[in-house]
Image (cartoon, rainbow, N blue to C red):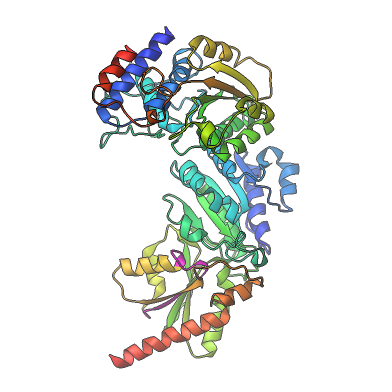
Amino acid sequence: MTQAYKEARDAVFLELFEIAARDKNVILFTTDTGAILFNKFKEELPGQFMNVGIAEQNAISVAAGLSLSGKKVFVFGISNFVILRCIEQLKIDICSMGLPVTIIGMGTGYVYPKDGPTHHMTDIISLTRTIPGLSIWSPSDYAAIAGITRIAYASAGPNLIYMDKGPFIPLYDDGHDFTKGLSLLRQGSDLTIVATGIMLPLACQAVTELEKRGIDAGLVDLYRIKPVDEVSLLDALGKSGSILTLEENTIIGGLGGLVCETVAGRGLGATVKRLGIPDSYRCEVGERNELRALGGFDLQGIIEAAESLVAARKTKESQS
Amino acid sequence: MLTAKAKEIRQRTLEMVLKAGAGHLGGSFSCAEILVTLYYGNILRYDAANPAWEERDRFILSKGHANNSLYVILADVGFFQADNLENYCRSGCFLGNHCDNTVPGVEVITGSLGHGLGIAAGMALAGKLDGRKHLVFAVIGDGESQEGSIWEAAMFASQHRLSNLIVFLDRNGLGSEDFTENTAGLEPVKDKWLAFGWEVHSVDGHSIDELLAVLADCRSRISDKPIMIIARTVKGKGISFLENTPRSHHTLPVGNEIEIARRDLS
């Protein structure tokens, strides 16, 4: 089914309902994290939906056992609890055996801004991308969430969908092919911004603002964190030599680290400015954008970083 | 007959780990009779020529470090050639120091404690959902039972009435470095499992007769509870100087101990 969604949970769970209705081997677990759509599963597909309680590690292990018996299991929960708490179960029980289990982590970065460090999902990209065999998705709009859910179902191996409730802005048509892993949304000659997931709306806003200031910024949406098509990514980065990465994840080992590894690994010279969550905990209570501002990656921070990158490049060019 | 087989398995296991210079004799020997009962006592349904046989019972050695005796058994019953045991833990061999599902007859990678019971519960749930008749067996350790995930799985299994799940607790009293009751005590362990909603039995884990008796009606019983069989065992059972000692976890006999160990098992 392909349709225009306006809510993240609709995009994932309506898609999943359609899939599960066709395939009785599809099972959805929630770890006591709610969604209105679960009532539809309970009523119409009761044998394929379970609230397995607040026992996330067990949920992952049980999913492995089901998967080894021919089931396709999707496990849903708040990202910190269903991913960070279960990192070993994810690595050993699921990924080391290459099982087709999909973890749907609700919330990225500061999605629960006032709930403190226990609910701030600051490091999941960095941690999970070290796990061999795991495909990691960071969808950037509702069509992407739905399309990636379909890809995960069709996949023979483990997937992690690290999704946010939004709000997103529409970037893709329904039915867009998300198997490529990234999209060059805009070409730019002065610098290229690489963003992922919930940062795309802000990145689009920044590109518009930079244009007003005479800076031509490209924009790449890296919605699949792993595996990365390095050739496509390098093509998309262009030749400006100035790259700004944007993620609501620690800047240590996340999207920015990934881009640095890719560029440096190919022996290419580029300046990469990584914007994201600094190496910190946030107990300050604030709105999401206020926490981003504290870390220097709100709209103002992005513009300043972009201007600084472009100015540094011009200075360097004038000296050479 | 099965007692003699257990003795043979211990002897062959000792020689295998001595040659390799690696292994976990203590935990392998405490569950030796459990494994022999399952594989030779007409309990576990398997087809060594077809490890993926759909109707097979599933067996998970959740305390994956005890794979030494399991590998000897899997070779003995024909899952792979016995000469592979000569290269156990040697570079390039597929037989390593913990359970690995690339080994024919091994269902699941185990070695990090506290994982196998949840996986077994998932297999049992799948069997229930699909109306299949096979059983799921697992062996967990008592040191392993200090992991919280064991108790998450215990709640899950009783909640979902996984009566097709049969678990042995290899109650040898020891973790890796100390007795469980000195570190994070498990007693009263029988009451704990009863309180978690399981059907609980307690047996001498080195008595083949008691093990066979407790499993006699495992396919025909009418119950909606998973089964916990608390097997009272001795870590390092059979080798005098290793029995009931923390060093038996991963310390192998050296020097004149080697001949003492061989004599003990003869």
In the shown orientation, is residue B123 left or right of residue A232? Answer: right
Nearest the eye: B248 or A206: B248
Nearest the eye: A16 or B170: B170
Residue extending farthest to the front is B182
Q: Position of residue A262 (x, y in %)?
A: 36, 66
Residue A216 appearing in the image: no
Residue extending farthest to the bottom is A318
Q: Position of residue A153 (x, y in %)?
A: 55, 48
In the shown orientation, is residue B235 left or right of residue B134? Answer: left
Q: Position of residue A83 (x, y in %)?
A: 55, 52
Q: Is residue A184 a member of the stretch shown in magenta?
A: no
- Residue under the image location 37 percent in, 90 percent down: A314
Q: Is residue A251 a member of the stretch shown in magenta?
A: yes
Residue A113 appearing in the image: yes
Nearest the eye: A253 or B126: A253
- Residue under the image location 60 percent in, 28 percent down: B189
Q: Which residues are magenta?
A: A240-255
Q: Position of residue A208 (x, y in %)?
A: 55, 83
Image quadrant where one finds the C terminus of chain A? bottom left
In the shown orientation, is residue B39 left or right of residue A110? Answer: left
Image quadrant where one finds the N terminus of chain A? bottom right
Residue extending farthest to the top is B1
In the shown orientation, is residue B215 left or right of residue B28? Answer: right
- Residue under the image location 48 percent in, 19 percent down: B34
Relative vertical location of residue A27 with respect to residue B121 in this rendering, above or below: below
